[in-house]
């Protein structure tokens, strides 16, 4: 199939590259000309494991190309994948201006029947509104299907090739079948439903996963007070097949470009039909508070943080990505600086993106974990990058002015750190010292 992918962010670029690997002819479009020129040279503007090889292989095979000319891309394609951003408005509601503009451009570019597959996460009812918008401009027949995306940054390529399921929302079974045919080599678990239900499946899935995270974080907070170990609690809970082990890792909470925005959007979607989604509101509140648990732990050890030097390990919202959108590190670093601390920050790949969004004279940007720890009163681990687990603890201790490690992701074991002479505090686990 000849496919135009509109938007070369985490979703569009990965989907485009994966569909080209499946021998479709893919042309990826972005209005950001600098992204297109980087991509056309075979370079990748984001960090996503396995993506560069995939892009280069398919560019060389002539199945994958990049352009900022949306019109010509749409004209030479039978199907269009819409993967532009749907960020939050200050109210929490999804901002649909970008996707509506892209839909207008697609409509104006059409030169025959097109199947438009919407992968962007959009509130219930949006695809029908896009249908009306395109119909008001287009001079050719078209159909819109909702194909919500479930990939995770950091493992996006693997997730796209091995999805748990593909959800397709369509008004007509023929349109659903074209979309299904495109995805059939990825999985036979293709769930076809109506458009509104498909839109809701995406929000409900993210809200449910966010709920699991906030739930285990609250259990962790109680564990700390009653002397239980949340990692053991989660393990024991997870053996129950009705519960499962995934998304039960206590820590400093979720972040990134999806969970925070999609939970807020679902609260707004409910509010717009006079339904107060009380549970999800609490999930969001718990997540916001949880971010500051490392700051509270530091204050319990040091009292005031004014003039203290705190090393921050990890700025990305999770390992294996350079994405810092709504990362817990942002709130935490801002709080530390606000309390008068000096911060020494590092991250294997996300440092430039983070620094772009927030810089301060009291932040030193460091190459690696040991450099960040130089002269520090404490290390705060905020992202569980594997490289941090491999740090030589004796060297670390020697470089710090006080051996304090606050582990916001439960990456280390208390025995390991305390054996190495650290004052160690993690989330929901009893300290040995
Ligand atoms: P992104 O912000 O990384 O990328 C969007 C891209 O679209 C940008 O490069 C932008 O320049 C481009 N764009 C905007 N308008 C355009 C236009 N008119 N023509 C061409 N290009 C245009 O976004 P993302 O993280 O890939 O997310 C895209 C959508 O997928 C969102 O709705 C998001 O909620 C959803 N989603 C994201 C993820 C994820 O992990 N990032 C996972 C599942 C679903």
Image: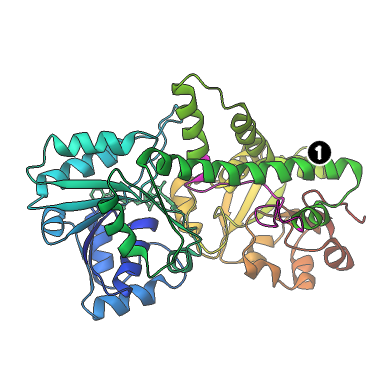
Q: Choose top left, top right, bottom left or bottom right for residue 37.
A: bottom left
Residue 249 falls within the magenta-colored stretch: yes
* Position of residue 22 measured from the top left corner of the image (x, y, whole percent): 32, 73
Q: Is residue 315 left or right of residue 191?
A: right
* Position of residue 34 measured from the top left corner of the image (x, y, whole percent): 25, 58
Residue 280 seen in this snapshot: yes
Residue at x 27%, y 75% (from the top left corner):
23
Q: At numbered mark 1, what does the secondary structure look like: helix, strand or loop?
A: loop
Residue 315 falls within the magenta-colored stretch: no
Q: Nearer the viewer, residue 266 or 312?
A: 266
Q: Nearer the viewer, residue 63 or 374?
A: 63
Q: Which residues are magenta?
A: 239-261
20 to 143, vertically: above or below = below
388 to 314, vertically: above or below = below
Colour mode of the rendering: rainbow
* Position of residue 367 measured from the top left corner of the image (x, y, whole percent): 56, 66
Q: Nearer the viewer, residue 302 or 144?
A: 144
Residue at x 12%, y 46% (from the top left corner):
141
Residue corresponding to mark 1: 303
Q: Choose top left, top right, bottom left or bottom right for residue 412.
A: bottom right
Q: Main secondary structure of the magenta part?
A: loop
Quarter that holds the N terminus: bottom left
């Amino acid at each position: 199939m000849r496919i135009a992918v509109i938007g070369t962010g985490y979703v569009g670029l990965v989907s485009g590259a994966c569909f080209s690997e499946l021998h479709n002819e893919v042309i990826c479009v972005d209005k950001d000309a600098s992204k297109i020129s980087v991509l056309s040279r075979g370079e990748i503007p984001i960090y996503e494991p396995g993506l560069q090889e995939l892009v280069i292989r398919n560019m060389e095979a002539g199945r994958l190309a990049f352009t900022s000319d949306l019109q010509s891309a749409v004209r030479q394609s039978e199907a269009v994948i819409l993967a532009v951003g749907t960020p939050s408005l200050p109210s929490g509601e999804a901002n649909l201006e970008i996707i509506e503009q892209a839909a207008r451009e697609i409509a104006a570019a059409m030169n025959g029947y097109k199947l438009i597959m919407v992968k962007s996460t959009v509130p219930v009812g949006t695809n029908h509104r896009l249908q009306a918008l395109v119909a008001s401009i287009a001079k050719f027949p078209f159909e819109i299907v909702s194909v919500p995306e479930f990939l995770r940054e950091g493992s996006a390529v693997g997730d796209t090739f091995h999805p748990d399921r593909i959800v397709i929302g369509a008004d007509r079974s023929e349109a659903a079948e074209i979309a299904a045919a495109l995805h059939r080599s990825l999985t036979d678990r293709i769930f076809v439903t109506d458009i509104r239900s498909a839109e809701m499946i995406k929000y409900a899935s993210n809200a449910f996963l966010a709920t699991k995270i906030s739930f285990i974080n609250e259990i962790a907070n109680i564990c700390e007070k009653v002397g239980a170990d949340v990692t053991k609690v989660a393990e024991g809970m997870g053996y129950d097949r009705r519960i499962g082990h995934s998304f039960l890792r206590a820590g400093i909470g979720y972040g990134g470009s999806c969970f925070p925005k999609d939970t807020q959007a679902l609260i707004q979607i409910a509010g717009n039909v006079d339904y107060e989604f009380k549970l999800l509101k609490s999930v969001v509140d718990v997540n916001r508070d949880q971010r500051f648990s490392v700051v509270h732990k530091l204050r319990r050890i040091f009292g005031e943080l004014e003039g203290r030097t705190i090393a921050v390990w990890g700025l990305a919202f999770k390992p294996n990505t350079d994405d810092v959108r709504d990362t817990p590190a942002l709130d935490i670093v801002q709080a530390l600086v606000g309390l008068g601390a000096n911060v020494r920050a590092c991250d294997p790949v996300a440092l430039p993106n983070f620094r772009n969004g927030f810089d301060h004279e009291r932040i030193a940007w460091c190459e690696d974990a040991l450099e960040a720890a130089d002269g520090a009163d404490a290390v705060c681990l905020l992202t569980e990058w594997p490289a941090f687990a491999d740090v030589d603890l004796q060297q670390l201790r020697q470089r710090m002015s006080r051996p304090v490690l606050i582990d916001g992701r439960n990456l280390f074991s208390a025995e390991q750190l305390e054996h190495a002479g650290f004052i160690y505090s993690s989330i929901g686990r009893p300290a040995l010292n």
